[in-house]
Amino acid sequence: MIYLNGKIEEESKILKAIEYGYGLFETIGGKGEKLYFFEEHFNRLKNGINRIGLNLKYDIEYLYNIVEDLIMLENIEKDEEFKVKVIVAEDLFYVSLNKIKLREEKNGIKVGLIKSYFQNELGFLKSLNYMNNILARKELKKNSYYEGVFINRNRHITEGTISNIFFIKEDKIFTPSLDLNILNGIIRSKIIEISKLNNIKIEEGHYYYDELLEADSIFFTNSLMKNGLLWVKEIDNKLKQKHEFITKIENEYKKILQK
């Protein structure tokens, strides 16, 4: 038995799942009846669940049917955007769908260095314990920053609180590599793919914050961002421009969504 919000109740599976953050989640964007990169999200979830020793009891078709039902129940119109959240923990399988507007900042965003918290060593997992990221976002909000840059204990830049990082210098794109324990973002992978297909030089590696500050352009990627990315107009009071590569990538990304 447990005490919850003024009442004695039976212990719920949901409370067990969130008690220690032992579980994973995925957030999937969509529009109308279309889910964006559904298979990629499912595969990442499945791989993560296997890695932490849990069991995903349902297959991709089962999950897809659930989402289809939720789209119908929410009366999603043809041009309406939405997000699907899937949570898997021990004895818990949770799926929600909510109407949203994908994040869009045509004039760019302001970002800064996250100073109070280092990169989470388990950042490669979308775990239910996002305390590090939540506290970092509170820090950023005080400075009116839209997003921030984590660094690890070796002072390498890693990722944002809800996104992957890319920067452009001398007509070449750079992004932190996966061996820095960052999330293997679905859109991150798409950006790398788009760049290579369009003969844009791109490199994954280890970079310092000063290198980011000296970049010509910077952008962040996330599944719930319009066109897959948001470009940076200012980082720690240093102004940046929107490189032509960013516009090219946005246009190619739109084509993928329309297929």
Image (spheres, grey):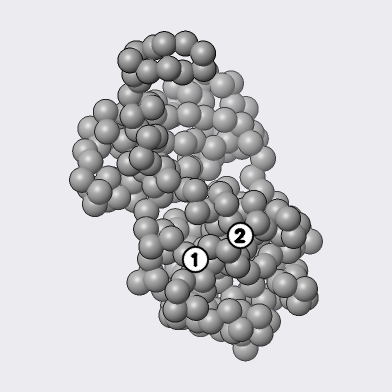
Residue shown at the point (62%, 53%) measured from the top left: 137
Looking at the image, tell me whether mark 2 or mark 1 is earlier in sequence order. 1
Instruction: Name the residue: 33% across, 46% down.
Output: 45
Where is residue 61, by image quadrant? top left
Question: Tag 1: residue type?
Answer: Phe
Rendered view: 247 above or below 26:
below
Query: In this rendering, does residue 196 appear at all?
Result: no
Give the class, few, some or many, for how many residues have Cα within 10 Å of label 2's Cα (few <14, many ≥20): many
Residue closest to the eye, 161 or 242: 161
Query: Mark 1 = which residue?
Result: 118
Disc 2 marks which residue?
Answer: 229
Residue 20 visible (yes or no): yes
Q: What residue is shown at x 68% (from left), y 65% (from top)?
A: 111
Q: What amino acid is labelled 2 in the image? A: Leu
Image location of residue 63, percent across then percent down: 35, 32
Q: Which mark is residue 209?
A: none
Classed neighbour count for the residue bearing mark 1: other residues with Cα under 10 Å, few (<14), some (14–19), many (≥20): some
Identify the residue at horizontal 61%, vertical 31% (top origin): 99
| Foreground of the two, 202 or 92 | 92
Q: Is residue 94 left or right of residue 151?
A: left
- Residue 95 vertical placement versus 178 (above, below): above
What SS does tag 1 mark? loop
